[in-house]
Every structure is written in C-alpha cells, then in structure tokens.
Image (cartoon, helix red, strand yellow):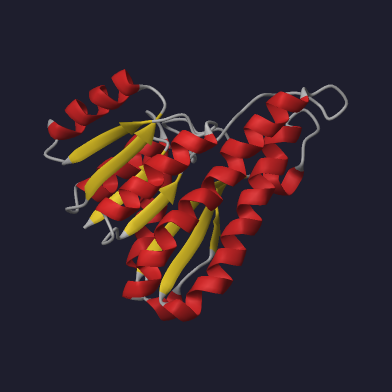
Amino acid sequence: MKLLLIRIGPGIGMAVARQFGRSGFEVLMIARDADKLKHYEQELAGEGIRSQGFAVDIADETAYTELLARLAAEHPDLDLLHYNASAYNPAPPSVISLPVFHQDFQINTVGALIAAQAFLPAMKKRGAGTIFLTGGGSALKAPPELISLSIGKAGMRNLALALAEECAPLGIRVATVTVHGMVQPGTKYDPNIIAGEFWRLYQLPGDAWEREVNL
C-alpha cells in the first residue's frame, strides 16, 4: 500500500505519515526543503516506516507538475493521495499583494487540482483509490485578515466536493477534513487526532463514505 503526502511537515503531515505507516503503508512525501525531508525519512525509518521524500516548491507549477507526472508513472498503484498543503500570509482584501495572493491560491487550491489530475487516470483505470484534502475553517468564515487563506481553502473545499461527486461512480473515494482551529498538540486540534480522523475515514466502506468531516 502506498500513500503520497503532499506537503509534509511536523504537524498533520507527520502524524498522518505515522498513522498510515504503522499500518503498512509506504509513505511518499513532498515538501520544499530537501534537508527536512531527509530528517523525516530518518525519523520514520526509526519507527519502522518506509518513506521517500521528493523536494519541490508547489508554487513552481512547472517543476511541481513534472514531479507529479513522474510519480504517477512510477506509482500507478498508489492507494491514497493526500493533499495537505497550505499557505498562510495574513492580510485584508484591501491591501494584500496580488503576487502573494496568486501564489497562495496556487498552493491552497491549484496544487490540489494538479495532483488529482496526475493520479486520477490510473485510479480510474483500476476503479479504486482515495483522495484526501486537508481543509480549514476559514473557508466557511472568511475572516478579512485571512483573505488569501480563506479563498484558497474555500476553493479546496469546493474542489473536494466536486471531485467526490465526479469520482464516486468510478469507485474512487474523495473527502476533506476541515479543521476549524489552530493545529496544536494537546488540544482538540492535536495533529494525532486529525490523523486519526483521516484513518477512520479511510477504513469506511463505500456505502458509508463521508465526503466532508468538520473538526
């Protein structure tokens, strides 16, 4: 079994890698920093989890698309695609820089679409596969100081629901977990709790599938 986790970090990303890795998944990881990826590989290896990291900047659409095309060709049997990327640059609508807004949208929404388009052909051919997207509560609240994040997460949420509708008849399961608070250990938004929710979803039978979970 294989999981591709697109952007891994010390919070939700590593918690998901551990949750699925402990159950036998090989974890493929994408992040921008090659040194951090090496550290995550070593950390997971110490826990008996196989992993491999690939460094790319999601905002670099050409490099990112090329990497995903290569991974899709090398791993047509991918079981689970999890898009966990998020860009956070607080600013209200009246003053946000357009280059920042465009880059944030690229990371928060466009990157998820590119990833889905890369792996869906093989999933469609197999008639199986799962796609997860990590959402955020700002998608539903639209706080003015988080305009780029809220629009990006709203776009991701709509993408997840549209993909779920399109893919359900094909045997492909799509869901988003929307996290309505700051991810922090020891709280109800503990990354291990969030990872556990993704694991619960993954184990659901098709007739009990949930397209959106709010935490």
Please name the residue shown 16% across and 41% down the image.
49
- Horizontally, residue 213 falls left or right of residue 51, namely right
- Residue 86 is situated, as x and y percent measured from the top left of the image, at 55, 35
Please name the residue shown 77% across and 41% down the image.
142
- Residue 191 is situated, as x and y percent measured from the top left of the image, at 41, 38
Q: Nearer the viewer, residue 57 or 46?
A: 57
Query: Image quarter for residue 6?
Result: top left
Please name the residue shown 29% across and 58% down the image.
78
Residue 27 in sight here: yes
Query: Image quarter for residue 17?
Result: top left
In this view, 168 is above or below 176: below
Please name the residue shown 81% across and 27% down the image.
92
Residue 180 in sight here: no
In this view, 70 is above or below 87: below
Furthest residue toward top? 35
Q: Nearer the viewer, residue 106 or 187?
A: 106
Tally of marks = 0
Q: Nearer the viewer, residue 69 or 38?
A: 69
- Horizontally, residue 176 falls left or right of residue 106, namely left
In this view, 45 is above or below 210: above
The quadrant in which the N terminus is found is bottom left
- Residue 48 is situated, as x and y percent measured from the top left of the image, at 11, 39
Furthest residue toward right? 94
- Residue 16 is situated, as x and y percent measured from the top left of the image, at 34, 44
